Each structure stands twice: as C-alpha cells, then as structure tokens.
Image: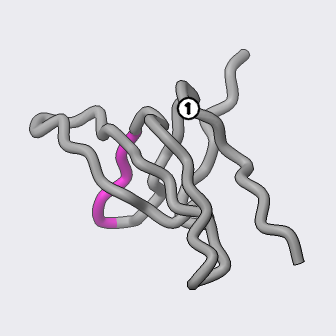
Amino acid sequence: MTITPKLKPGQLIKFDHPANSTLGLVKSVSIDRTWRTVQVLVQWCNDSNTEEYVWQEDLKLVETL
C-alpha cells in the first residue's frame, strides 16, 4: 500500500473542529511510515501564529475560486 500526500506546501487548509475551526498554511509534508499516514507541518493563521504537525486526514483543502 502506497502512502501518498494529498497536500502540498503553500496550500491553504482548514482544520474543521467544532470547538476550534481555523485556517492554516501548509509548510511541509512528510510520510510517517510507522503510523502509515501523512503528517503536515501547518502554520496557523491565528493570534499566536504557531506551527505544528497535524495528520493529513484531519485537514481539508480550502479551494480557490
């Protein structure tokens, strides 16, 4: 089974959680072979402007018009 990233650096994403829905920018994408998933380094667009790794399946791509 091949693990393929769906997101690319520079894309705008959304973390859609009822308590904390926020936008972020994809900085890098890495494959975690141990967990067989993809981790995405996201810089959040909020007051603290922090970066963190998030599982790819928890994120949605914000489509451009």
* Rendering coords of residue 60 (x, y %): 61, 50
- Which residue in the rendered view is the most extreme toward the front? 33
Residue at position x 10%, y 39% from top? 48
Decide which of 49, 63 is in the foreground and name it: 49
* Rendering coords of residue 39 (x, y %): 52, 61
Residue 31 covered by magenta stretch: no
Label 1, residues with CA under 10 Å away: few <14, some 14-19, many ≥20: few
Residue at position x 26%, y 45% from top? 51
Q: Secondary structure at mark 1?
A: loop
Q: Quadrant of the C terminus?
A: top right
- Which residue in the rendered view is the most extreme toward the right? 1
Q: Which residues are magenta?
A: 19-23
Residue at position x 49%, y 41% from top? 28
Give the number of marks: 1
- Which residue in the rendered view is the most extreme toward the bottom? 34
Decide which of 47, 28 is in the foreground and name it: 28
Asked if 64 appears above or below 46 in the picture, the reply is above
The three-letter amino acid code for the residue at tag 1 is Pro
**Along the horizontal axis of the image, is 57 left or right of 4?**
left
* Rendering coords of residue 44 (x, y %): 30, 40
Asked if 17 appears above or below 52 in the picture, the reply is below
Q: Main secondary structure of the magenta part?
A: loop
Q: Which residue is mark 1?
A: 9
Q: Quadrant of residue 56?
A: bottom right
